[in-house]
Image (cartoon, rainbow, N blue to C red):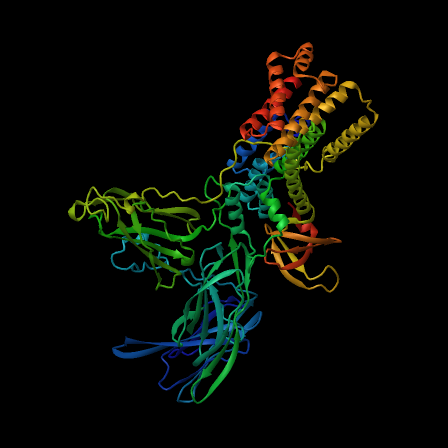
Amino acid sequence: MISLLLSISLSQYAPAEAQALFVEANDAYYAKDFSTAKDKYSKLLKAGLIGSDVYFNLGTTHLAAGELGPAVLFLERAKRAGTDDDIEANLSVAKERQADHVVGDEIEKPFAQRLAAVLPEIPVTIAFLALWLVGFIFVWMRLASGRGLFTVLAALCLFLALGAGTALGIQQYAHESIVESVVMSPSAQAIDHPGNNSKVLFEVHAGLLVRVMETYDTYARIRLPNALEGWVPASALENL
Amino acid sequence: MFATSALAEVEFYMTTNQDKVGVEDTFRLEIVVSGAPENSRLNYPSPDDFEVLGRSQSAQMQYVLSGGTSQIKRTEKHILTIRASHVGKLKIPPATLETTGGKTYKTESVTVEVVKGRLQQEPKRAPPQQSPFGFPPGFPFGQLDDDPLQDEPQTRDDNTTIPTTDSDLFLRASIDKKEAFVGEQVVLTFQIFSRIDLQQVEALSLPKLDGFWTVDTKAAAHLQGEQRMVNGVPYRVFMIQQRTLFPMKAGVYTLEPAEVDIVTGNYFDSRKVHRKGNALSLTVKAIPPPPGQNVVPPNVLVGKWRISREVNQTNLSLGEPIQMKVTVAGQGNMQSLPVPQVGAPPSFKLFDPVVKDTGNQKGVTGGQRVIEYTMVPQQTGTFTLPALSIQYFDPQGKAYSESATDAVTITVNPGTGGANVIGSGGANGTNEAANVKNQLVATGLKSLRHTAHFSENATSYVKAPWFPIAVIAPIVLTALFALLNFVRGLTKKETDESRRSKLAKESKKRLKSAHDLMANGKPAEFYGEVDNSLRQFLAAKMGQPLTGLTQAELDKVLSEKNVAADVRLKIVRVFENCDLGRYAPGMGTAERQGTLNLAAESMEALSS
């Protein structure tokens, strides 16, 4: 909350101005002036005023304008910031319009990624810190009073803090090591290796969600949900 | 130009209808022979500078009364259609007439000035005849002046030029218009002009038609020619293929010449010849936007279209089907015709329509599309089928037009047994169909969020600089706290107070061990432990040893230390019970527990 207030106070918009800019962008959207709507939503993001609502509206505007790449990018970011049915519905629309059809069974996402998707980072972080501090407070009380009850309470809190800390660590590992991207270019050819005499394996199109396994020079090795892999220009991708 | 023979009885002369022609023009050379003896032989001129394209002949008999005698005079007129082969002042040599008596008549030669190009005007096209209306019986548009199929394309063969070479047999491509709008039909026709016998046409090679959507309109199954005069020259014209083109983009298109192999002659003497046709140019213009708009609507129809609707009944009972026939007819690309949405009420069960296309039989690309809908009302009431309309761009009028039908009102009366809804079994019944009224289908994108809840930046708490401090600080503080306690324990001087406090704590511990002894069934040890622990506690609290005191002395000491009377009484009772328990066994468990409780209560009272 403090950092939120700090970000709003440090941004170029007062809270009321930010809300007004958001409404203006909505009005432009309903007037089918998608360009103006996108500009105004983007101004909010540049000012650090982010959130699921801004991401959702910006992604929906791109979708209405037929720009699948940024549409999927911002809708996925909205999903990360706070999923709901509307986001899933518009993502489904974008998927229907997407040119690529990934054939075959989808491989299961890594455990760390699935856990990170299930557990919200901020509540887990707060829970860890609270349990950690309270546990040590009980330790201090035990040292001060010598009463055995504090020993039990301290052990319980520190045990729970250990679990929350483990979940937090897995989340950080997922965020650091598992990079997901969206294809932004209208189309990009995937080659078998980033070098001379490379062979074109397949082609991906705007709006496809891929996982970036590694990058080399100006290329990124991507993995599709069905485990199909290839190297595409990194400039054709945008990380979530 | 005019030239005559010198004889009075025989009139023999030669004229042309033009004294100045273009090298591409044809003109007529007339040779008139009048009053010639029978069996005279006429020799046509054989000019080197001209090509004779056709010959014809007519004769006229004249009955002449002269000096009381009658005489029949025969006049023959020979017409040659000729064309100059090059530019200049060219001379047509004289014709000759040889009689049976050995006499020869001769006309004067005729001089014709030949210039480049063409001087003759194109013959004007006759206005098109109104053709019978081509719709099937029952089609509602019967007015001839409103018939979109009425205007047949006129192939532009009027200006067909006879090639300078192979004039006896040549291939001609023609289009019915030189300018068209995008999507407007253009009829491309390939014809063979021949003055010799033909057997068959082989291997017609068409030009590339990139940029057009094409439809085969006609293709000759077998050669069937028609007589036609081309610049005064009679030809047999064979239509071998006709295609309708629909330009897809604006621009100027050049259609390259077609080529064809033709077998000429007869069965016994045939010959295959190759002919190359002519190139064509077509200018395609973009469709203008509708009035008041800046852009052309997508998928705009081009041509002339009419829409009509027939409904078999408008007043019916529940459960009876409604047959509705929608007909869209006209000229243009039928493939671009949409299937109209009938806008049936939600309470009507609408079956998939049956679409039937009928091509036009009159050489015009177009025809009619009949869409038959079957609807079954599911509930009683009065319903309106909205008007149907179709908008199109008319390239001839160069304007947008719209054809529309009227709305139709359908009255559905209760069915058998007075049922108001299908399947209800009566007016009071319920069914699922009756509930289907307003179909709300979730389509399209979800609505925007109208209020923004801004959240903090995506920077993780874990990556914040204070996070490791918050994690490590409790550990460090705990270590410091423990260290401090340890140091304090080492350096602290044991005072009387602390010593007594320590002793009091030990006494309480001993009381606990007494409880264990009681549980283990050792009464003597139990009482001894209770007595010792209480004495040790009291000594610690009172600050003086209490060993060896009688109970009265003990009470006195306690009283001096301001111990309450009830507490003193409890203490005395504990010691009495301990004495009895140790030295007069037989006290029960209840007494032991009571003694233990009294000792504990006494300690608590003195501790507080």
Give above or below for B573 relative to A148: above
Q: Position of residue A69 (x, y in %)?
A: 60, 47
In the image, is B265 to the left or to the right of A188? left
In the image, is B157 to the left or to the right of B463? left
Q: How many marks?
A: 0
Residue farthest to the left, as pictured? B417
Q: Quick one: B309 or B595, which is closer to the camera?
A: B595
Q: Position of residue B508 (x, y in %)?
A: 67, 26
Give above or below for B440 relative to A191: above
Q: Quick one: A124 or B41, which is closer to the camera?
A: A124
In the image, is B576 to the left or to the right of A32? right
In the image, is B96 to the left or to the right of A108? left
Q: Quick one: B29 or B198, which is closer to the camera?
A: B198
Give above or below for B163 relative to B212: below
Q: Position of residue B239 (x, y in %)?
A: 42, 71
Residue at x 74%, y 24% (from the top left corner): B502
Q: Position of residue B556 (x, y in %)?
A: 67, 11
Query: Can residue B4 be seen in this snapshot?
Result: no
Q: Quadrant of the C terminus of chain A?
A: top right
Residue farthest to the front, as pictured? B584
Examine the image and state in which quarter residue A48 appears.
Answer: top right
Q: Quick one: A107 or A194, which is closer to the camera?
A: A107
Q: Quadrant of the N terminus of chain A?
A: top right
Examine the image and state in which quarter residue B545 appears.
Answer: top right
Examine the image and state in which quarter residue B256 appears.
Answer: bottom right
Give above or below for B141 relative to A57: below
Residue at x 62%, y 48% (from the top left corner): A113
Query: Can residue B466 be seen in this snapshot?
Result: yes
